[in-house]
Amino acid sequence: MAEILTWLDQTSFRNAGIVLKDSWDDSTYRPPWDDSEPAKNTFLFTRGFRATNIAGCNLLLRNDDARTVGKSKLEDSTSEVVAEVWVQLNRMSPNKGKHTHRYTSDPKKISLLGAWRTEFSYNGWFSRTIVGLTLRSAAWKEPQRWEGLNVAFTFETKEMGEKFDAAFRQAIRLCRSK
């Protein structure tokens, strides 16, 4: 499994946009002991992430110069932002989420994120986090944190998306079988 993630780091992560969807809503079941803060935003990050830690079924991706996209353009940022995205593959489903599909034909969105998307989501029946985000900037007193149930990766070409989708889902299967 680590070999697959290492291969993805060498071939795919740096070329993928990352989408962290706002995945909590009032209809999502949350057990009484779950007092985690609901995800309040959807983040769309441009390319440039690298795997900085692969520990078992946990993956940490980092971008030291993260850029977010909003309304078909890069968000204005006055300071450098470091984004760390952690993914728990053993909590993900190899079958849930859309396989590689064309999600946009808008030339502006394609130039920022790519036209092809593959999506992954939680394996269970009640809310559990599979993906988390920490944003840091020298301009902020505290880092910003976010957790959610869905993650997607975007690519320029269908072929890149399909290769990533097959390999990432295989890594999830290997983690689920442990």
Image: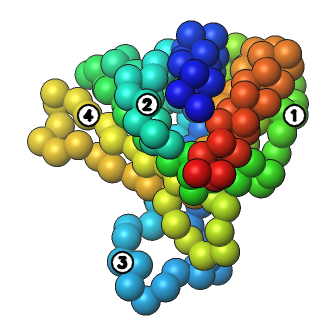
Which of pointers 2 and 3 lies earlier in the amino acid sequence? 3
Measured Cα–Cα span from mark 3 to mark 4:
24 Å
Local crowd at mark 4 within 10 Å, few (<14), some, or many (≥20)?
Answer: some
Q: Amino acid at mark 4?
A: Arg
Measured Cα–Cα span from mark 2 to mark 3:
28 Å
Q: Amino acid at mark 1?
A: His
Q: Secondary structure at mark 4?
A: strand
Residue furthest out toward the bottom: 32
Give residue 136's mark: 4
Question: Mark 1 = which residue?
Answer: 101
Which of pointers 3 and 1 lies earlier in the amino acid sequence? 3
Measured Cα–Cα span from mark 4 to mark 1:
32 Å
Q: Tags 1 and 2 in contact by the CB under 8 Å rule?
A: no
Q: Position of residue 24 (x, y in %)?
A: 56, 67
Measured Cα–Cα span from mark 1 to mark 2:
27 Å
Colour scheme of the picture: rainbow
Describe residue 13's horizontal placement relative to residue 168 as left or right.
Answer: left
Camera-nearest label, 3 or 4: 3
Q: Which of 146/32 is in front?
A: 32
Residue shown at 79% from the left, 30% from the top? 166
Local crowd at mark 1 within 10 Å, few (<14), some, or many (≥20)?
Answer: some
Give residue 35's mark: 3
Q: Which of 101/138 is in front?
A: 101
